[in-house]
Amino acid sequence: MSFKHIFVCILAVASLNSCLRDDEPSGGGDTPEYKAYTLGTPSSFETKLEGLSAICMNETGDGLLVAEDNGHIYEFGLDGQLKNTYTVPKPDGRSKVDLEGIALSADGKLYVCEERYREVYLLGADHKTITLLSTGPTEANSEENQGYEGIAAGDGVLYIANQSKPKRVYTYSLITKEWATAFDAEWATSLSDILYDKEDGTLWITDAKTQKLTHLKTDGTVLHTYDISFVKKPEGFCKDPVNKKFWFVCDQTSRLYSVSYQ
């Protein structure tokens, strides 16, 4: 074979290899393709309680903790039955405390957020005492009843969802005690709860007005959106990874909802 023919063959192989690399996913194929969850048939449980605003798994993973607008924490079994009621004292002698978010961290600590005063608290192990951690940013022209609606506990950081004006997710570092803006959720209408998923380090956000559940990265990149219209006003959301169920609270119907996922 002549030198010319050998040179042409080398160019052809190099060109083929280049085409194959261009067809690979970004990141060289290391980033797995997102696979959407499949939801089952939802179930609902009547509570006859008003103002249900947030939900998380309890410390032992065998029950649910639900925060209520006027400072009560309710504990439910996974059968939807009420087990305990706890009353949280109102800070600084206020007439009202508007608890809108509750989250359990990986180290077993419970955090709650107060909407109108835009505050974050550590909830005591007795579920009846709270300690102020920090007061967060108050945006210009924001309204009291459009503040902190959800809280999520990540790895050394809390994620706080502001309902609207702006529709924004903040972070609060448990290490440096500093606040920052994670992202603005312009795709949403009214943020109502947020969850940090310890299984893959992602976030889940519910929208009470559009009845949507959005799965996204911590930088705000949307992965998938789920229709949850079986919940009339989804104020709270949590994930039970052991039993593979999503849980919701609805303050319009006073019901708990669960739905299996795969």
Image: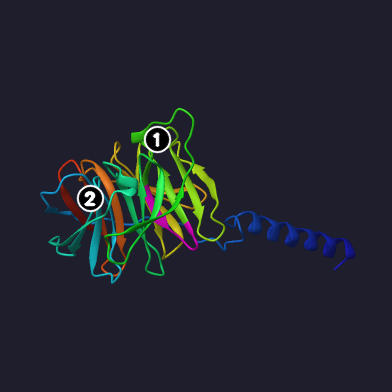
Label annotation for residue 164: 1
Which residue appears farthest toward the bottom when viewing the image? 60
Q: Residues within 10 Å of mark 2 (few under 14, many from 20)?
A: many
Q: Position of residue 141 (x, y in %)?
A: 45, 27
Q: Is residue 104 left or right of residue 253?
A: right
Residue positioned most to the top: 141
The amino acid marked with disc number 2 is Val
Quarter of the view holding residue 124: bottom left
Return the disc, 2 or 1, that comes first in the chain's sequence.
1
Is 106 displayed left or right of 11 in the figure? left
Q: Quadrant of residue 10?
A: bottom right
Mark 2 to mark 1 CA distance (whole Å): 20 Å
Q: Nearer the viewer, residue 254 or 219?
A: 254
Q: Main secondary structure of the magenta part?
A: strand
Amino acid on which the number 1 mark rests in the picture: Ser
Residue 247 on the magenta span:
no
The question of residue 152 being in magenta is answered with: yes
Task: State the residue at coordinates (64%, 58%).
Answer: 20
Question: Label 1 crowding class (10 Å Cα cut-off): few <14, some 14-19, many 20+?
Answer: many
Q: Nearer the viewer, residue 236 or 177?
A: 177
Indicate the secondary structure of the residue bearing disc 2. strand
Q: Secondary structure at mark 1?
A: loop
What is the magenta range?
150-157
